[in-house]
Amino acid sequence: MNFRLDRLLTLYLFKPLSRFAGVKSAILMYHSISDGCQNVHPYYQTLTSPCVFAEQMRFLHESGCRVIDLMTLVESLNAGKEPAPGSVVLTFDDGLCDFYTHAFPVLQEYGFPATVFLTTGPIDQCVCFMGCKCLSWDEVRELRKYGVSFGSHTESHPVLSQIAEKELLFEIVRSKERIEFETGDRVDAFSYPYAFPEHDCAHRKKLEAILSMSGYKCCVTTRIGTTRCEDDIFCLKRLPVNSMDDRLLLKAKIDGAYDWIYTLQSSYKRFRRGARNCR
């Protein structure tokens, strides 16, 4: 058990209240499925050990969660329909090789769909990304045959709000073109790298315009929370998952009891933006 403040508040204060929050779905956000040690608070962990991941997928199966494809959820949102109760979407950022070796066999066991967001530059260059080996295009094509969906996570994973519009366009369009060329499938989904600058209205408008123009149908972010019918499909919230999430905490997150974190997350971003503007 992970006795920490966010866990305690989630399980014992906000979970009892989540039953009144209405119909919602959960887009889970994974990164690396591997063993390792990160010297950061559990909130910032991006590693999920293969054993914990297998246990989490077993929990989804045994608890009767309806694991659906990301675009199935987006189609429901576009149609103004509430997602089916217990709907869960599995997403994996960065396109790391450990998805192929550790996550995919477990997903196959339960027949769960998943969307992997590829950072295409490191794949093309056959280099590691943040110290981790990336999927190869051959592995991407093999996974595609078994129903894994792929989306864009930019060309080089920059902080998009800090680059010029020309570079922003390149990062968004180039990655989409590379994935479509290598797989033969249309790329509909984009995953925003790093913290989403939701208080930067100019950047958000520019981003949505480029995504729409480029043919994307949705954008998932690092904004924390469950998804509801009225949500903007170009800044969808997700729930971070890692090795620190046992069954109790994962269930609470899916039920919406972790959504309170978004208020803190958003307030912190607003504070940092205000502090920068005052310099």
Image (cartoon, grey):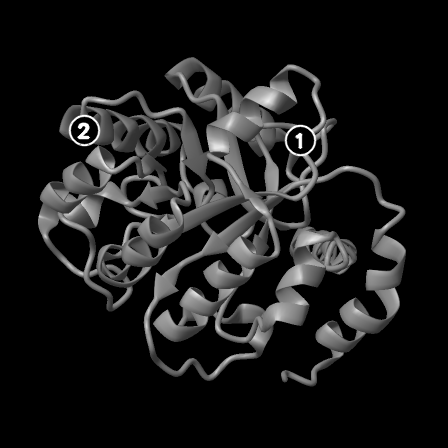
Q: Please name whichever residue, 244 or 169, is drawn nearer the observer in this view of the structure.
A: 244
Tell me residue 198's x, y (percent).
65, 41
* Residue corresponding to mark 2: 183
Number of labels in the image equals 2
Label 1: how many Cα within 10 Å (few below 14, some 14–19, many 20+): many
Question: Quadrant of residue 127 in the image?
Answer: bottom left
Q: Residue at x 54, y 69 (%)?
A: 44
Tell me residue 130's x, y (percent).
29, 64
Q: Please name whichever residue, 113 or 187, is drawn nearer the observer in this view of the structure.
A: 113
Question: Quadrant of residue 173 in the image?
Answer: top left
Is residue 138 positioned above or below 214 on the image? below
Looking at the image, residue 85 sits to the left or right of residue 212; the answer is right
Q: Please name whichever residue, 56 or 172, is drawn nearer the observer in this view of the structure.
A: 56
Q: In which quadrant is the C terminus drawn?
A: bottom right
Q: Residue at x 64, y 38 (%)?
A: 200
Q: Residue at x 60, y 50 (%)?
A: 64
**Amino acid type at image mark 2:** Thr
Label 2: how many Cα within 10 Å (few below 14, some 14–19, many 20+): some
Looking at the image, residue 51 sits to the left or right of residue 242; the answer is left
Q: Earlier in the sequence, mark 1 or mark 2?
A: 1
Looking at the image, residue 206 sits to the left or right of residue 115; the answer is right
Q: In which quadrant is the N terminus drawn?
A: bottom right
Q: Nearer the viewer, mark 1 or mark 2?
A: 1
Circle 1 — which element? Answer: loop
Tell me residue 241's x, y (percent).
53, 62
Is residue 202 positioned above or below 64 on the image? above
Q: Which numbered dot is residue 125?
A: none
Tell me residue 13's x, y (percent).
87, 68
Q: CA distance from mark 1 to mark 2?
A: 29 Å
* Residue corresponding to mark 1: 83
Looking at the image, residue 262 sits to the left or right of residue 66; the answer is right
**Amino acid type at image mark 1:** Pro
